[in-house]
Amino acid sequence: MNAALKTIRNSGLALVAGLLLMSAPALAQDAVEGKKIFEGNCAACHSLDADVVGPALKNVHERRGDEWLLKFIKNSQALVESGDKDAVAVYEKFNKMPMPAFGSSLSDGEISSVIAYIKEASAQPAAAAVAEAPATTTDAAAAPAAPAEVAFLDLPPVMLITFALAGLVALLVVLTLVMLFRLLVPMMGDSIYDEDFRASFAGRMLFLLKGDTTVMTGKAKDVIHSNHDFDGIQEYDNDLPPWWKYMFYVSIVFAVGYMLHYHVFRTGALQEEEYEMEMQEAALIAAQNVEDPNAVTNFEVLTEAAALESGKAIYLQNCAACHGQAGEGTVGPNLTDEYWLHGGDVNEIFKTVKFGVPSKGMVPWQGKLTKDQMLEVSSYILSLQGSNPANGKEAQGEKE
């Protein structure tokens, strides 16, 4: 009897082990298939490690569960409208951008494969990040180094000597003035208080150094204007403060010089001319910086069949998830009508593809697509004009 039980037990363990060994390749195969589906439908809006248009998906199965993920991928808006707190939280956090419903385009098995891929990718160690570190270092080395700050004592000796001599000269001038002041003032005795001397420039400067500010503020005469008494309010006949008069005289001289410089001899550029020159300089700088969204581009629409076919393949892989397989628009706008949110010229579409519109959920594709690929997909988008696909989204933007 014991021998029979032992045999049954061993057979059961072998069966369980066999099932586990059989299921491991199946799960791995599901993950491989799921990766293909993920890259074709989800990668445009999702990353494992960072929020893009949608949330980061690493370990999302642990936070939400397989059943919830299946429902959300099939029809996220139905889950939001049902009041599911997790679905509502995701919808609110990501600017109420609705995720496309994949219930009609993907089977439950395909969605399960995507979840299997997310599980497998989440379980992988951070070796990929370590492997990418040298590339990051290389990029950092290739980038132009920021100018380092130089300490004052590290300046060239000639500059240090120049600063020292300038400071010494300034100190000697101050000491000389102080000594002259201390020597001459006692020698002048009470004569410094004579009205003639106090009214002179030297007297004014001397008393200014002694703390008398009347040279700047003027001296009140305390003389009342005759017949200037209104309800007990009297008006004194005092001069304007000298500082105000000096500034007024300077402004007159400045105004004459300004008029001669800008309007008579025309040796200076007026505001409109300065604006035009600065705009030209900015355009030259922008043209040299290929990463500047304002840089001027002059691409022509590609019309060759091979280029448009390549653009179609890029579109279906990266753009169809948000704009529809035929450009009819789902989360993103309709690309087949005459209305555009960010311009319908090939150069404007190219810039939208390259730099994205993060505030509206459009991810930038620079770094993921080459310049030629972005031009191909931009040209393909323009080839969709007037195709009038079924279920086209309502027009958005301005008519081109």
Image: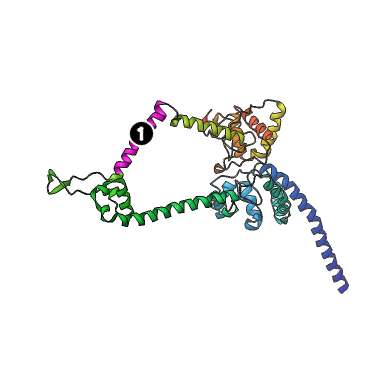
**Residue 100 drawn at (x, y percent):** 61, 43
- Which residue is labeled 1 in the image? 255
**Mark 1: secondary structure:** helix
Q: How many marks?
A: 1
Around disc 1, counting alpha carbons within 10 Å, would you say few (fewer than 14), some (14 to 19), or many (20 or more)? few
The answer to if 256 sits in the magenta stretch is yes
Q: Position of residue 32 (x, y in %)?
A: 75, 48
Farthest residue to the front: give it: 187
Q: Say which of 365 and 338 sits in front.
A: 365
| In front of the other: 284 or 222 | 222
In the orientation shown, which residue stands out farthest toward the bottom?
A: 2
Task: Look at the image and tell me whether residue 370 can be seen.
Answer: yes
Q: In front: 107, or 347?
A: 347
User: Which secondary structure type mostly characterizes the magenta part of the structure?
Assistant: helix
Residue segment shown in magenta? 244-266
Q: Quadrant of the N terminus?
A: bottom right
Magenta stretch holds residue 290 = no
> What residue is at 74 percent from the left and 46 percent from the top?
33
Q: Amino acid at mark 1?
A: Ala
User: Colour scheme in the image?
Assistant: rainbow
Give me the residue at 25% from left, 53% from top: 193
- The percent position of residue 137, horizontal first and vertical second, equals 70, 50
